[in-house]
């Protein structure tokens, strides 16, 4: 297969190593294609180690698997999930077992060459030295002079070191031969470079992660081999400092291993939430939204509302996933109506500003103590007659039909204002100057664009004792939800 013939059709689902890969919804293909083209051009005749850096939740695993799947028909490609393999005591075994499993079958000739090279890794494994020394101790354990034991052990260690150095040279020659065979199309119809893609390194045990990096440096630094290593690099630096100390320059240390760094952009919060929302919730949202007051018009508006809140309150992707999933849990299970925006804001405050959450819960909170958001929150409500039950609004003493439909408003201090609405346990009628009693659904509300009016319209149908949560129940649900990660 020619390199130019690589299929980048990420808009359709695919499969790789027996795992389902859904369609790309975050427009990642263009980044993968750009990264690949540079690695292929530079890596054909030189060694290259690239660090894909992205924060947790940005889609590194999907990106690396989809990339590996796309190029595997054109290049010898090995994919390693390092975190799944760090139960092993030896990352060297992890790398070579993955190579043998995924590259065996290129041809009989190439498979024989692989096996011949892999046979030499035994003495390099961590488990080899203790076993060899144990044999020496047993052999000479009958001697009386401890200095003789020390001398024999020292001699054996020197011999073992020499053997390891020899084996490393042999293995590197073997890998170089792989590269030559690939370049000559001898036993394989694929092209250089050989790609080794490693994911989840930052989640591994610190000693395992460091050892695996050293393998890329000392054994695979061969022209024609490209390593692509995906990490949350900040987390990987923390792991390195666990081993070498908090004052150790982890960034400088990593620069010894990585030739280039590729920043995988963080997706927009809206696109990210769309990606993680279960199909069952999307499909049933017309029913689920009936539990939400004020109700969003559709699933897209619901996701946009949540995204606006997360962005305004500067919640990262990792925490957004947890808080968003908790909100969906409550929408699925709550028997009563509630304000999903208010509940999400309170959940964020509980998670990230717990002292302020305590003030709110104790009713010692005022709007001067509000968390200072850099931007307002944009929310869309369905304020139509069908959704809210509000048929008539007052304006300049005249009754008017409710003409609201979907209303997008940008607001500040949302939780302060909505708290007052939730404290109203039922939509009580109001008395006009002539003593006529009007409720919220039939002239009890003024037609204006204030947040107070918008919220009352949104609550009008469900603000009864048996259909809406009371304020203490919000706090109870939020605190219960923290027990289920």
Image (cartoon, helix red, strand yellow):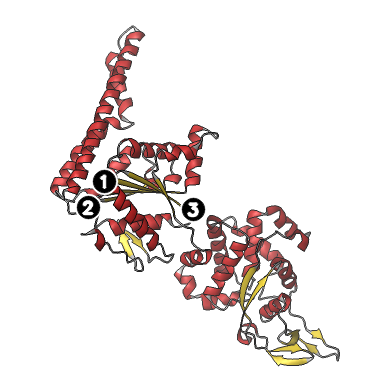
The x and y percentages for residue 118 are 23, 38
Q: Quadrant of the N terminus?
A: bottom left
- Tell us which disc is closer to us: 2 or 3: 2
Element assignment for label 2: loop
Q: Can residue 260 be seen? A: yes
Q: Quadrant of the C terminus?
A: bottom right
Query: Can you identify the residue that label 3 sits on?
Result: 56
Give yes or no for contact between labels 2 and 3 (Cβ–Cβ under 8 Å). Answer: no
The x and y percentages for residue 275 are 46, 65
Q: Residues within 10 Å of mark 3 (few under 14, many from 20)?
A: some
The x and y percentages for residue 247 are 55, 34
The x and y percentages for residue 326 are 56, 62
Q: Residues within 10 Å of mark 2 (few under 14, many from 20)?
A: many
Query: Can you identify the residue that label 1 sits on?
Result: 45
Q: CA distance from mark 2 to mark 3?
A: 33 Å
Dividing the picture into quadrants, the one containing residue 399 is bottom right
Element assignment for label 3: loop
Pointer 2 or 1: first along the chain: 1
**Which numbered circle lies on residue 191?**
2
Q: Is residue 123 above or below residue 252?
A: above
Q: CA distance from mark 2 to mark 1?
A: 12 Å
Q: Residue at x 15, y 43 (%)?
A: 112
Pointer 1 or 3: first along the chain: 1
Between 356 and 232, the one nearer to me in the picture:
232
Q: Is residue 71 above or below residue 463?
A: above
Pointer 2 or 3: first along the chain: 3
Q: Is residue 235 left or right of residue 85?
A: right
């Amino acid at each position: 297969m020619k390199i130019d013939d690589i299929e980048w059709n990420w808009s359709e689902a695919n499969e790789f190593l027996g795992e389902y890969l859904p369609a790309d919804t975050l427009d990642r293909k263009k980044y993968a294609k750009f990264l690949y083209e540079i690695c292929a051009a530079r890596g054909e005749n030189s060694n290259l180690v690239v660090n894909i850096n992205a924060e947790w939740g940005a889609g590194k695993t999907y990106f690396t698997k989809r990339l590996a799947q796309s190029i595997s028909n054109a290049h010898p490609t090995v994919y390693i999930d390092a975190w799944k393999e760090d139960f092993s005591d030896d990352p060297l075994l992890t790398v070579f077992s993955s190579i043998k499993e995924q590259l065996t079958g290129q041809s009989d000739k190439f498979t024989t060459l692989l096996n011949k090279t892999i046979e030499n890794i035994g003495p390099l494994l961590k488990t080899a030295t203790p076993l060899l020394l144990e044999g020496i101790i047993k052999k000479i354990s009958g001697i009386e002079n401890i200095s003789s034991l020390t001398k024999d052990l020292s001699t054996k260690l020197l011999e073992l070191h020499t053997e390891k150095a020899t084996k490393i040279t042999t293995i590197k020659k073997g890998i170089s031969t792989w590269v030559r065979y690939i370049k000559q199309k001898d036993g394989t119809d694929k092209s250089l470079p050989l790609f080794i893609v490693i994911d989840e390194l930052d989640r591994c045990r610190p000693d395992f992660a460091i050892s695996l990096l050293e393998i890329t440096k000392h054994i695979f630094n061969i022209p024609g081999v490209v390593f692509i290593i995906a990490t949350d690099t900040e987390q990987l630096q923390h792991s390195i400092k666990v081993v070498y100390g908090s004052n150790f320059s982890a960034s400088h240390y990593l620069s010894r291993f990585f030739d280039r760094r590729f920043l995988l952009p963080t997706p927009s919060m809206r696109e990210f939430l769309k990606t993680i929302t279960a199909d069952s919730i999307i499909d049933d949202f017309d029913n689920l939204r009936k539990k939400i007051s004020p109700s969003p018009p559709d699933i897209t508006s619901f996701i946009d509302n949540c995204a606006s809140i997360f962005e305004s309150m500067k919640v990262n992707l990792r925490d957004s996933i947890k808080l968003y999933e908790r909100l969906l849990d409550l929408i699925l299970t709550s028997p009563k109506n509630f304000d999903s925006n208010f509940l999400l804001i309170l959940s964020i405050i509980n998670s990230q500003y717990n002292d302020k959450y305590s003030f709110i819960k104790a009713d010692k909170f005022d709007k001067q103590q509000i968390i200072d958001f850099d931007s307002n929150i944009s929310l869309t409500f369905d304020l139509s007659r069908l959704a809210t039950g509000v048929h008539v609004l007052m304006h300049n003493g005249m009754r008017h039909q409710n003409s609201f439909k979907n209303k997008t408003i940008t607001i500040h201090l949302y939780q302060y204002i909505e708290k007052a609405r939730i404290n109203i346990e039922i939509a009580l009628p109001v008395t006009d100057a002539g003593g006529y009693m009007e409720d919220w659904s039939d002239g009890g509300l003024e037609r204006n664009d204030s947040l107070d009016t918008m919220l009352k319209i949104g609550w009008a149908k469900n603000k009864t004792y048996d259909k809406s949560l009371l304020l203490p129940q919000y706090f109870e649900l939020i605190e219960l939800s923290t027990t289920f990660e």
